[in-house]
Structure formats: structure tokens, C-alpha cells
Amino acid sequence: MPVIECDIDAARNRLDDAGVSVETGNTDHERWRASRGGATAVAYDDKIVVQGNAPQNITALLRESGGRAHVYFDGAARGNPGEAAIGWVIVTGDGIVTEGSERIGRATNNQAEYEALIAALEAASDYDYDELHVRGDSELIVKQVRGEYDTNNPKLRERRVTVHELLGNFDEWTLEHVPREVNSRADELANEAFDDG
């Protein structure tokens, strides 16, 4: 059960900014409480206690902004083009902060990879990290974003511009190609999206 010592009013503002509903506390000692994705934060005078089976879903929002995170992304298409899905994970030293997956309709594999990267960067932007280390198993996407490969396809070129705009939200960032086994959780999430759909 994480205990976060912080300015509870500032933490509440961060929750409000992230769209998390904050309610009045249940006792005289509780200033407020908020729930998000299997975690409940209870604020007292000078600390916040996080309860539930997935505390990471709210702890990153409660802490002061800044810090470093690692992002993993993966997109997949069944057929090229075909039905496509994405998966992504944000990790800090405290563990998995959040993750997501969804079906995105019909797309090529490369389009799905870009959509996964964009979704992950949008989620990371909500947490206001200073430094982001992004990893994916698509060498093409990584090298296009880093400027090592040209992006001739107009749709992919548009997505690359969006990625650069999102990366501009961070003081520092890196983008690295990694083997599929290093990217296994994002890959699993993309495949689970197919199964859930």
C-alpha cells in the first residue's frame, strides 16, 4: 500500500487535469478520495494512501511532475492491410504505470505501429514526465522517426509529424529499436485486443 507524502491540493489538481473524478472523503480525517483503474487514493492532511490491486494506475498522477519513464509500443495487422490492433505500456522504477490496447480498424502493419506509438505518447503526456525512453520492435518506424529512413508514404509521413509533435512535450527523449522479446508486453496487449474484439 503506497504512501505518498506530497502537497495534497496540488495532487488533487493533477488528478482533475487528468480527468479523474475526486470525491469527498468518507470520514472526518479523509480530505478526499479518487479512484482510477483498480486503485483508490485517499488523502489525509499531509499524505495520500493508495489502496487496491493496481496502485500504479494512480500513483504516477499523484506525484510531482517530472521524472523518467520507459514506453513500449506495438501494432499488428492481420493481413496487410487488414484488421489492426495496438498495445502499449508505460513503466517507471515503481513498475507498470499504465497500459492500453485497442482495435483500430483496417490498417497496414506500419500504420498500426505508428498508431500504437502515438497512443503511448499521448498517455505518457498525461503524466508530465521530463524524460521518456521509447522502445518498439518495428525497425522501420524507429528509423523513420529518428530521421534515418525517408518516409515516402503520405499517411505514414503525417503520423511521423504527429509523433514528433508529441515527443516535443518532453525535455529529453530517446527512441530505440528492440527485439520482440523485449517488447513482449506491448505485443501481448495488441494480440489481446484482437481476441477481445
Image: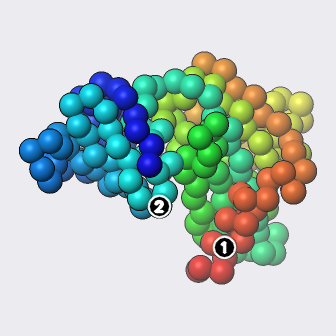
Compared to residue 171, the image places residue 113 above or below, namely below
What coloring was used for the rendering? rainbow
Seen from the viewer's position, the closer of residues 51 and 66 is 51
**Residue at x-position 48% and y-position 39%:** 60
The image quarter in which residue 81 lies: bottom right
Q: Which residue is mark 2?
A: 53
User: Which of the two discs, 2 and 1, sits closer to the camera?
Assistant: 2
Seen from the viewer's position, the closer of residues 79 and 192 is 192
Decide which of tag 2 and tag 1 comes sooner along the chain: 2
Compared to residue 109, the image places residue 144 above or below, namely above
Compared to residue 175, the image places residue 35 above or below, namely below
Q: Residues within 10 Å of mark 1 (few under 14, many from 20)?
A: some
Residue 3 screen position, x and y as percent: 40, 38
The amino acid type found where label 1 is placed reads Glu
Cα–Cα gap, marks 2 and 1: 21 Å
**Residue at x-position 75% and y-position 28%:** 174
Residue 179 screen position, x and y as percent: 90, 50
Locate residue 174 relative to residue 65 in the image: left or right. Answer: right
Seen from the viewer's position, the closer of residues 187 and 45 is 45
**Residue 71 in sight in this render:** yes
Compared to residue 191, the image places residue 159 above or below, namely above
User: What number is the disc on residue 129?
Assistant: none
The amino acid type found where label 2 is placed reads Asn
Q: Which residue is mark 1?
A: 192
Query: Which secondary structure, mark 2?
Result: loop
Residue 53 screen position, x and y as percent: 47, 61
**Residue at x-position 27% and y-position 28%:** 46
**Residue 168 in sight in this render:** no
